[in-house]
Amino acid sequence: QVQLVESGGGLVQAGGSLRLSCRASGRQFTTNAVAWYRQAPGKEGEKVAEITHEGKKNYADSVLGRFTIGTDNARNSRWLQMNGLRPEDTGVYYCFAWLTWGQGTQVTVSS
């Protein structure tokens, strides 16, 4: 049974940075494919970044140029580097792979 566990969330001031990690257990990341979503209070969920099976990286317009998605096969994990954080980036961030969701990690950006 595959499990995804996110970490790295926290409270940061606007303009700061965080690096989220999504570590898999029960299955190896043999492909790059993963997506990061976020859920903000009162808003619809949003896919913020993904790596496709072909290795292409895609970003939501709202995070383009500030967020970077990457892989760490040595740790069987995928990460999301978030720079230039804004209060509107606040939310719970989830990784998604193999039709499986992690439990989420809270990101709070203060103004």
Image (cartoon, rainbow, N blue to C red):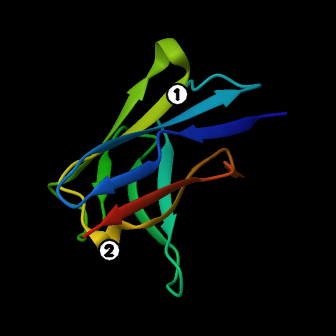
Q: Going by the picture, which residue comes out furthest to the bottom?
A: 42
Position of residue 87 measured from the top left corner of the image (x, y, whole percent): 30, 71
The total of numbered circles placed on residues is: 2
Position of residue 74 measured from the top left corner of the image (x, y, whole percent): 48, 12
99 or 92: nearer the viewer: 92
Picture quarter containing residue 61? bottom left
Q: Residues within 10 Å of mark 1 (few under 14, many from 20)?
A: many
User: 10 above or below 1?
Assistant: below
Could you tell me the amino acid type at mark 2?
A: Glu
Q: The N terminus is located in which quarter?
A: top right
Q: Going by the picture, which residue comes out furthest to the top?
A: 74
Q: Residue at x 24, y 58 (%)?
A: 85
97 or 89: nearer the viewer: 89
Q: Residues within 10 Å of mark 2 (few under 14, many from 20)?
A: few
Q: Residue at x 71, y 25 (%)?
A: 27
User: For this view, does 86 lie left or right of residue 28?
Assistant: left
Please tell me which of labels 2 and 1 falls first in the chain: 1
Position of residue 102 measured from the top left corner of the image (x, y, whole percent): 66, 48
- Which of label 2 and label 1 is nearer to you? 2
Could you tell me the amino acid type at mark 1?
A: Ser
User: For this view, does 8 lie left or right of residue 68?
Assistant: right
Q: Residue at x 47, y 33 (%)?
A: 78
Residue on which the image places disc 1: 77
Position of residue 68 measured from the top left corner of the image (x, y, whole percent): 27, 44
Give the Cα separation between the discs numbered 2 and 1: 26 Å
Residue on which the image places disc 2: 88
Label 1 secondary element: strand
